[in-house]
Amino acid sequence: MSDDLFNSVDALLAAVNTGLPLPAERQRLRLAAGLTPAQIAAALRVDSALVQGWEDGSTVPGPDIAPAYARLLAGLAERFPAPEQPAAPAPAVPQAFTAPAPAQEAADGLVVPLLDQNPDGSLVMGPAAPCVQCGQPSVYRAQGRPMHLGGYCRPVAPAAATVTQQPAPQAPARADQVPAAPAPVRPAPTASPVPSARPRPATTRTAARPAAARPASSAATAAAARWWPAVALDVAEGGDWVLDVPQIPAPAGPKLGDWFAWLGTGLPLRVERAHPAGRGGDGMVCLTAAALKQLGLPAALPTTEKALAALQAKLAKAAAAVGMEISDQIGPSFHAFRRAGSAGGPKTSVRVTVAPWLGQGDGRQQAVSALAGPLATAPDGTKDGLTLARRYRAFTADLGVAPGATTASTAMLLLDAVRPRVEWVKDQVTGEWSSHPREGALPSGDLCVPPAAGARHPLTRELLSKGEAVCEEEDYKWWARELTTEEARRPWAVAVDVCASYLSVTDSLRLPIGPYAYVENPAWDGGKTAGLWWCDFTGIAVDELLPHPATFHGQAPTGPGWYATVTVTYMATTYNFDPATITAAYLAAHTAPLLKEWTGRIRSGYKRTYADLGLVDGQAPEEFLAAYAVHKDIGTDPVRADALVLAGAYKNVYKGGIGKWADSARHLDDQVWLEKVAAAWSYDPALRFHVIAAARIAAHRRLRKTLLLTGRAPIAVNVDSYLYATDAPSPLELLPVKDDGTPVPGALRLGIAPGSHKHEASIPLTAVVEAMERREHPSKLVHHYTTDGAPIGQEQGADSGTAGTDNDDEEGGN
């Protein structure tokens, strides 16, 4: 009955447009309650930017949100009435512990404690003791008494001790150092544009999933601590537990049962969601070798079934004693969790990664933690839990998503995190929530078109068996030409390659979304619609000193073929191709910059890590060359060591993500592959063709502009590595510059930014000519010579010029 009355009142309030307090009063009430915009946004299931807009008067809540917001403000006004005189602005950081305030009460009637905090904002903690509400161990204190974090337990009495909530402690500023006092964390890149200032329409759509995934009390009333993605558990010389995030309490004792009890206390470990409509993830506890020894666990993962089963039983028994469970299979990484309603404490789930075990176990066990291995590898080659936790936090802060099993799967996790495919909708009649695809989401199901279905797909095999053409939009592969007379007189060949070439095009690239439609004699719209077009580029004159822009082999096409929109646009605008001659096309139902937010996250992390290595935007060419020559010299500096590892990880995330669209998954048989891979939303080879075509066209545009400005052209190209004949073992003479000495936009330039170039090697031209006479591609010599022209040695440079490898110098190198 009460729910019906509330619903009726809410509808009436919305109909008569209730008057909300003035924006300044809304802010005062929030601050008086110690709440943040993010906490109110979580309760109302909107973006925190909207809450800030309501408080500064730049926007107003829509009719579907206003009643709930009004109820919240009214409740706060009762508890925190306006003072007779204007109150002084609250200090940004509390200077002393304040007096207790009334207890917060959640929607289900539970009392939600606000935990004690120190003057610096960190939580007051002590030895684990029975919580005054549920009786389970807790290291946190509320008014001096043991109590769980954020009200995760059910009270045994209607009253509970509470304190005034202070601002939550923040994560450390550097990913590699965690000071005793919290410092500001580096903010992650914006996941999506700021919501419009227009009032929300009267609709049932919401910006986020209903709060059932997390306790309503913690979402609405705000837990008093910030979430950390990971923490390392280590042991001091005296045997005491040590954590690399001091704000997280240590286990109460050294035994395995104490450890599981600690995991189940509701630790502030979680990966926060990157988009209001997305999901967060479990936090991680990293165990060091010393922690393993203290817990009585083996230093190496057992290799026999019997020993592994005994370890599984030992862990399961210790977990069950405190109402916890563990994953069905144990490996370097596993989960410890407690189901809702289980005895022992709140519902919780934590990932556990045993750093010394990484790289051990069977293929499945290694596969689920393949990316964690490099992140955990210290400069001395050991797998270290402290190193893993530090880099894990930096990775999550940079990208907004935790590392997945591999870089390719992480790329898809990131895309789904910053551009969620589903949203949650509430039925206004039944009150039930259900998920639906968001507008512009990539659909599931096998939607491949015949000319771009991937090498393993039956559609491709059928076309090839008939001798028909398929799409071949690929990176340049092994193109070379004869030297001109002038080039043959130069003594050197300088190799440069593009930094992060894919990232230089994916930000604004409009990609196909939704099913493709086959169209005969399609109308050309200037390149606004993404798709594949049947075009004949034979006979069209292009630059003779450059590879052909439309083919991966760089030679002129011998007949019509299927080309991505970006290739057709370039041929039409640069070489006067007539789009009226196009006879067929597969066109997408919807076109959008699908990878915009994805690119922004990766590019931001990419630039940050290289800045730690001394490489930043805007460096003069000489300065950049000097910095790049030593950027891998990390010495004993953990910041540089972490940056170098993370830079490589980010590079492989964007490379692996582009390749994932055409995943062949050779470990699966054909039928399983069709059901599990080809029918997934993350499989669409046409998307990969569009990105690669855009990167290849962007490279050709830079090469052409450089040729027009300087008369210099590459003598060989492989992927995005270019070989030029030069007078000195340096790329400086190749750079077109303005009268003031600054680089010319859109041409070859040196720098770390995506789309800029770095110096790979300088090779004596005689060696290049000899290789070409042997009918070998000269790019294979790149790793046999240093940037000053000195030979490295066959054993050091062997097997370094093969395309498709995952080394530092393939696909941009950075």
Image (cartoon, helix red, strand yellow):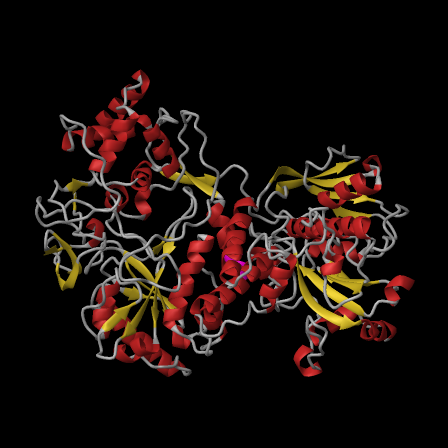
The reply to whether the magenta stretch includes residue 528 is no
Q: Residue at x 26, y 70 (%)?
A: 242
| Residue 200 appears in view | yes
Q: Residue at x 91, y 47 (%)?
A: 539
Q: Residue at x 85, y 46 (%)?
A: 537
The reply to whether the magenta stretch includes residue 409 is yes
Please provide percent x and percent y for residue 647: 53, 62
Can you say which quadrant of the picture contains the N terminus?
A: top left
Label total for image: 0
Please provide percent x and percent y for residue 252: 18, 68
Is 425 left or right of 349, judged from the image as shown? right
Quadrant assignment, res 802: bottom right
Please provide percent x and percent y for residue 538: 88, 48
Quadrant assignment, res 74: top left
Front-most of 222 and 261?
222
Front-most of 762 and 216?
762
In magenta, the rendered stretch is 407-411
Front-most of 205 and 808?
808
Please provide percent x and percent y for residue 805: 65, 68
What kind of secondary structure does the magenta stretch mostly adopt?
helix
Is 348 left or right of 535, judged from the image as shown? left
Q: Residue at x 68, y 54 (%)?
A: 749
Can you say which quadrant of the picture contains the C terminus?
A: bottom right
Instruction: Classify 231 as above or below 418.
Output: below
Is 433 left or right of 444, judged from the image as shown? left
Q: List the single residue furthest toward the top.
A: 16
